[in-house]
Image (spheres, grey):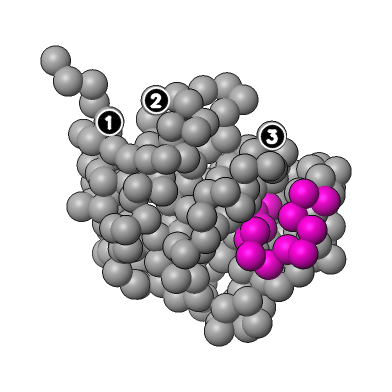
Amino acid sequence: MTVKIAPSLLAADFGCLREEALRAQAGGADWLHVDVMDGRFVPNLTLGPAAVAALRGRVTIPLDVHLMVEDPLPLVPAFARAGATLVTVHAEACRHLHGTLQQVREAGVRAGVALNPATPLQAVEHVLHLVELVLLMTVNPGFGGQAFLPEVLPKVEALRRRLGPPGPGVPEIEVDGGITPETAGRAAGAGATVLVAGSAVFGSPDPARAIAELRAAAAQATRSPG
Ligand code: DX5
Ligand code: ZN
């Protein structure tokens, strides 16, 4: 099983998002991670559905939209229409998480649920059957370039045990925040199947090389012994 690499546009040059997205795609990115922030759930404000629609017309890889917004449900139809492939909502931001995820699926996009570092796995126990992705934050959300929080690794391991081995019908485990070649191996070794990397990719003069290094570190950590 090859771990997917999802570069986060938050670290890209916002003055040329299209070129940056195409460069990541050409460099081997599996998905493009789009961090949407509303200035309320997190103290930052970023991209909206119009940016996703502009990207949809340019890149062919899945658009992995991470909604760091309070009460995300009203925004879901616009992101679905804009061409999002996956829409991930935070459990902490939804008053009715089960109903919200049902409506994400009814909007015709793949549903994901995200947990902040302090939120226990128990928060998603009763919605795992509704999602194709569980995003575990390894930084406190709002900004790129932060240090990886290793105390989240046991949560990744526990989720891997809870879901069983990766495979068809098993939700992806996406780890998001502070991913570098060093932490990529630790996250993949703990059971992550998708790694989000912003500054490690877009902060590099050679995004293709950065993506290859992350993939190699993840492969090294998940190679069966012998
Ligand atoms: C943080 C975002 C992350 C962030 C990752 O709130 O959800 O996706 O952009 O950036 P790096 O890889 O630089 O930590
Ligand atoms: Zn993110």
Specify start and end residues of the magenta stretch as a single range.
87-99
* First along the sequence among labels 2 and 3: 2
Name the residue at 40% across, 60% down: 138
In the displayed structure, 122 sits above or below 160; it is below
Dot 2 lies on which element?
loop
Left or right position of 146 against 48: left
**153 or 182, which lies in front?**
153
Is residue 122 magenta-colored?
A: no
Residue 198 in view here: no
Tell me if residue 93 is in the magenta stretch: yes
* Residues at marks 3 and 1, CA–CA distance in whole angstroms: 26 Å
Alpha-carbon distance for marks 2 and 1? 9 Å
Observer-side mark, 2 or 3, equals 3
What secondary structure is found at the residue carrying circle 3?
helix
The image shows residue 81 at horizontal and vertical percentages of 82, 54
Residue placed at 53% from the left, 68% from the top? Answer: 17
Q: Tell me if the residue at label 1 has its CB under 8 Å from ligand 1.
A: no
**Residue 222 circle label:** 1
N-terminal-most mark, 3 or 1: 3
Q: Quadrant of the N terminus?
A: top left
Residue behind mark 2 = 1
Q: Amino acid at mark 3?
A: His
Hey, what amino acid is under mark 2? Answer: Met
User: How dense is the environment of label 2, judged by Cα within 10 Å: few (below 14), some, or many (20 and up)?
Assistant: few
**Mark 1 residue type:** Thr
Q: Nearer the viewer, residue 28 or 126?
A: 126
Q: Earlier in the sequence, mark 2 or mark 1?
A: 2
Return the x and y of residue 94 as percentages of the image width and height: 73, 63
Quarter of the figure with residue 35: bottom right
- Are the two marked residues, 2 and 1, in contact with CB atoms closer than 8 angstroms? yes
For disc 3, the marked residue is: 129
Q: Residue shown at 47%/40% (left/top)?
A: 159
